[in-house]
Structures are given as structure tokens and as C-alpha cells.
Amino acid sequence: MEPLLRARWFDGLSSQAQPVLVGLAPGPRGPALHLHPLTAGGAAPRVFAHGEIGWPEAWNPRRAQRTVVVDLRSGGSLEIDNGAQWHAALEAAGGRPGLAQRMQTHWRVFAAVLVVAVLGLWAFYRWGTPWAAAQLAQHVPLGWEQQLSAEAMQELDASYLKPSKLAPERQAELRAAFDSLVQQMGPEFARYPGYAPTMTLAFRSGMGANAFALPGGAMVVTDGLVEAARKRSLGDDALVGVLAHEMGHVVHRHTTRLVVEQGVLNVGLGLAMGDVSSIVATGSTLLTGLAYQRNHEAEADCFAVALMRKAQRPLAPMADLLLAIDGPEDEKESKKGKDDKPKATPPSSSSSALANLLSSHPATAERAQRMKSGQLQGCTAPR
């Protein structure tokens, strides 16, 4: 027979407490509570199933609280003066503390849950968000990418970039080489089925020696990059190779994946932390602070190597140009002191954050040497 505990019952109908006896009995989903009113003259007890009760939690593993308050929800509440007897009866009826209570009463459990949570968040950031972004990116309309790129380019032209000073004949030569390379992109180079952006090339001055790709197929080459190739007598193969790398970013939708990935990360963290107030954000805002990841650079390198090989163009000039752009650190420092004019800084608006994303690519000596030899790690043959 279940032990009975003395308690006071506030039924929610009267301000006066009723003396009752409370028993706990095992149930299919956890202990049930039997309430025996002392003033009912032998009436049948009122039974509350496990799910109908707000079970009080213990806060100290060694010392039970003096008074226990049990929430009977629609049935009112109970006050039990002997907390130790209550917890002993609950344990005897098969009651087991939940994870939240064990975290509150055992620091080892709390530490273990904390470690698991941190590892889970790290794994979500490291593997979950890139995978989800890669899957979701295929559903992003090409029109959205093109609109975002047009807005970003407008902002860049208005506040950061300047018109190109290259002769029209030189621009036409490079554009012809670019178009010839685009013609080599068969279906075997497609990363996303049905995704066929129109590749375009524009020339600007500013940003130093650089080339970048906007989502949706628009690419920009700066006068500084053309001049860097000319000074080192690398020829147009070097510039075409860099553009092949940028095509890889477009085909793999790296910028779009970064935007989607940041959105997925914001949603995941918001749900994990119980705060979804900052989930809704625009694409241009999410561009702030992003940078191409190493695996994105590797994918673009592999794409460039495969495309250049199909076009029967050499890889060495492209690698040499990347090395020249990257340059030794001491050479970069020496150049800083020779500049007569201070370099412009990117504007802080959300659209021009795209300039921060695309303004440079990590071109280490090791990466360039591997590209030069055509032996990049992790590359697979185009389908």
C-alpha cells in the first residue's frame, strides 16, 4: 500500500485549504497522484495522471526543500510540509528526475551537457551549415542573385570603383579571350542542375590588382591586375586563368552559399538559444563580414585547372600572377611607404560589403605552386 502524506489542498474554488492525504503510485508514464480528502467521509480518491501534474524539482541533491508545492493545474495546488518524505515517496513510485533537475543538482551532469551542447553547436557550424547552404542554394532564383549583384555594383561604382582606363582595343582583346573560355564550359562543369548564369566581364580601376565575381555571373577585372600581368610579361593566359577561377566561384554559387549559410547559422543559433528575434534579415545585410572559405577557394582552383586544360591553356602564368599579387610580406610593407595617395577604404553600407568579400583571395605560395603543377588536392574530374 502506498504511503500517504499529509498535505493542504487549494482547489482553486475556495481560499481555504483543505486537509488531505496524498499517495503516489506507479503509472505507465510515471507516478500518478492519489488525493484523499479527509472531509469527504470515505469518498473515492481523486486521481491525477502523471501528465496532469507540474512536478516540483529538487534544487539540492543532499537537502530536500522544507515545503513542496505541487501544481495540479486545473485541480489547484498542494502544499506538503515534509519535502524529504515527498521525494522518498516519489522515488519509490518510480519517479526519476529529469535532465533539467539533474543539471541543477549535479555539476558533473551540467558539465557533460554543456560540453555536448558546445560540441553540437560547433559541429552544426562546421559541417551542418555548409551542407544545408549547399542544398538550399540550388533553390535560390538566379534573378535574386542578379538583382543583388546589380545593387552591389551600383554601390561600388558610386563610392569605390572608378571607370577603367584601359584602351577599348585592350578591353576587346581580353573580352574575346574571356568569351572563348566561356565557350569551353560544357554541361560537365555544372555544379547545380539547371543553373546557367550568363558570364559577363567588366573593367574598372580601383581595388588594386584584383578580379572578383558577383553572384549570377558578373565578373570584374581591375586595371591593376592587367598592369601586374603586363609588368611581369605573363600574357593573357594569366588573366584568363584568374577569370577561370572566378567562374568557379560563380558556378559553385559560393557567394550565395555564404549568404544562405549565414542565414542558416542565424536561424540555428536563434532556435538553440531560444531567441528568434534576429532571424529575419536581408541578403545584402548578411554579406557583411563574410569571406570565401578555404574549401570554396579549393573548388574554384579545381574548376579553373579543369577549364584551362580543356581550353588547352597553360596553368603556370595564372599561378605566377597569383604569386605576384600575394607577394612577400616585406615587399608589401615596402610598397606601403612609397604610395603618394592614401588608398580608399570600402564604404560601410551593406551592399558594398560585397567588396570586402571579394576584394582579395588568399593566394599562398603552396597553393600557387600546386596550381602551377596542376596537382591540386581533392579535385575530381568534371562530370
Image (cartoon, helix red, strand yellow):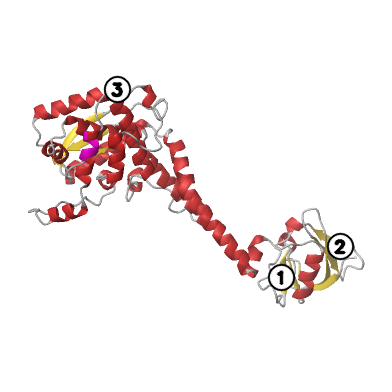
Of the residues tagged 3 and 2, which is closer to the observer? 3
> Is residue 279 left or right of 91 when viewed as pictured?
left
> Is residue 327 left or right of 282 when viewed as pictured?
left
Question: Would residue 324 be visible to someone looking at this image?
Answer: yes
Question: Would residue 219 be visible to someone looking at this image?
Answer: no
Q: Residues in magenta?
A: 317-321
Element type where label 2 sits in the image? loop
- Residue type for callout 2: Pro
Q: Main secondary structure of the magenta part?
A: helix
Is 150 placed above or below 267 here?
Answer: above
Q: Give the numbered dot on residue 69.
A: 1
Q: Give the numbered dot on residue 45.
A: 2
Say whether residue 320 is magenta. Answer: yes
Name the residue at 54% across, 57% down.
Answer: 117
Q: CA distance from mark 3 to mark 1?
A: 76 Å
Give percent across and percent down for residue 16.
76, 73
Element type where label 3 sits in the image? loop
Q: CA distance from mark 3 to mark 2?
A: 84 Å
How crowded pointer 1 is (Cα within 10 Å; few <14, some 14-19, many 20+) is rated as some
- Residue type for callout 3: Gln
Question: In this orientation, which residue lies closer to the viewer: 380 or 201?
Answer: 380
Sequence order check, earlier mark of 3 and 1: 1
Question: In this orientation, which residue lies closer to the viewer: 366 or 220?
Answer: 366
> Is residue 284 left or right of 345 when viewed as pictured?
right
Sequence order check, earlier mark of 2 and 1: 2
Q: Give the numbered dot on residue 102.
A: none
Q: Quadrant of residue 253?
A: top left
